[in-house]
């Protein structure tokens, strides 16, 4: 299965997926909306095709998404993986990849969609936090949940400490979810994913 990974920055989740060497998966390309994204250089060094597509060069979100889709489709992906891709996507874009686009979000959805998830969890006095892999739908951070991982929130936690704890779990959870997709083990039934969608 061909996989295209979209990133915006360091791409540590992308690296975890590449390093997992998932049977039956070929990382066809890594695409970033920031040409200077550190993850692009990492992927290029490993011989993976890379594309830097600067969203600031486009007049509208629609124009960027259309071009992004054509860049993605050039690699004929079976799966599109959003890994720290920090752009809101248009409904046309999410519809195009329905059922074959995954995202990872650093909270236990449906709690804390959007930004600053760790600080919000600390501020709310949450005792657990975590991350969620989900299929992407038009609504931000809301698609069918594939996998979740849980970590404790410690009394003296800082945003950075909690983020690091969650990130380590992301690096386990996301390759596992991609492996399940590639193996054909995930079926979307409405808002639910059945098969071996799992927690950790
Ligand atoms: C991760 O915490 C991811 O969940 C969030 O942004 C971060 C990206 O990190 N959406 P990286 O680029 O994968 O290192």
Image: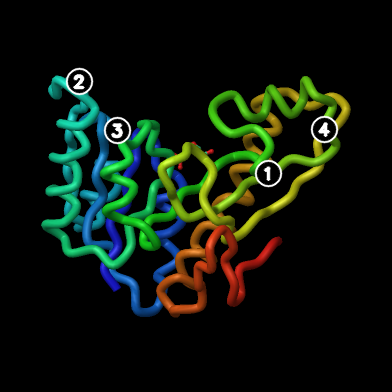
Return the disc, 3 or 4, that comes first in the chain's sequence: 3
Name the residue: 56% across, 58% down.
Answer: 191
Which of 173/74 is in front? Answer: 74
Q: Residue 114 at what x, y percent from top left?
A: 54, 29
Tell me where residue 48 appears, x and y as whole percent.
21, 56
Horizontally, is 192 left or right of 43 in the view? Answer: right
Q: Where does residue 182 sit, x and y in percent of width and height? A: 40, 74
Residue drawn at (26%, 43%) of the image: 92
Q: Secondary structure at mark 4?
A: loop
Q: Quarter holding the C terminus?
A: bottom right
Toward the front, the furthest residue is 190
From the viewer's perspective, is residue 78 above or below residue 30?
Answer: below
Specify which label sits upstream in the sequence, 1 or 4: 1
Mark on residue 108? Answer: 1
Q: Nearer the viewer, residue 60 or 19?
A: 60
Q: Are marks 2 and 3 in contact (CB under 8 Å)?
A: no
- The tag earlier along the polypeptide, 2 or 3, is 3
Q: What's the distance in space between the residues labelled 2 and 3, CA to CA?
A: 14 Å
Q: Earlier in the sequence, mark 2 or mark 4?
A: 2
Could you tell me how far apart the alpha carbons at marks 3 and 1 are, in whole angstroms?
27 Å
In the rendered image, which residue does mark 4 sit on?
A: 126
Instruction: Report the residue at 14% width, 24% height from top.
Output: 58
Residue 152 picture quarter: top right
For label 1, the crowd category at 10 Å Cα-Cα, with few meaning under 14, some 14 to 19 and many 20 or more, is many
Rendered location of residue 138, percent (x, y) = 41, 42
> Above or below — where is 5 with respect to 3?
above
Mark 3 / mark 1, whichever is N-terminal: 3
Q: What residue did someone put label 2 on?
A: 56
Q: Are marks 2 and 4 in contact (CB under 8 Å)?
A: no
Left or right: 196 as drawn, with respect to 136:
right
Q: Earlier in the sequence, mark 1 or mark 2?
A: 2
Residue located at (44% from left, 50% from top): 136
């Amino acid at each position: 299965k061909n996989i295209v990974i979209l990133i915006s920055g360091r791409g540590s989740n992308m690296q975890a997926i590449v390093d997992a060497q998932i049977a039956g998966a070929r990382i066809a390309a890594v695409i970033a909306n920031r040409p200077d994204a550190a993850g692009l250089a990492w992927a290029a060094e490993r011989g993976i095709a890379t594309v830097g597509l600067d969203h600031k060069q486009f007049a509208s979100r629609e124009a960027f998404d259309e071009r992004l889709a054509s860049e993605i489709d050039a690699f004929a992906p079976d799966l599109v993986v959003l890994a720290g891709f920090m752009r809101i996507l248009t409904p046309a874009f999410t519809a195009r990849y329905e059922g074959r686009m995954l995202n990872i979000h650093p909270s236990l959805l449906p709690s804390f969609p959007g930004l600053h998830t760790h600080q919000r969890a600390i501020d709310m006095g949450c005792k657990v936090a975590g991350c969620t892999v989900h299929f992407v739908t038009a609504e931000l951070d809301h698609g069918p949940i594939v996998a979740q991982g849980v970590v404790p929130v410690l009394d003296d936690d800082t945003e950075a400490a909690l983020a690091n704890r969650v990130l380590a779990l992301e690096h386990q959870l996301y390759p596992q979810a991609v492996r399940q997709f590639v193996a054909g083990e995930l079926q979307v039934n409405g808002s639910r994913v059945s098969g071996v969608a799992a927690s950790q």
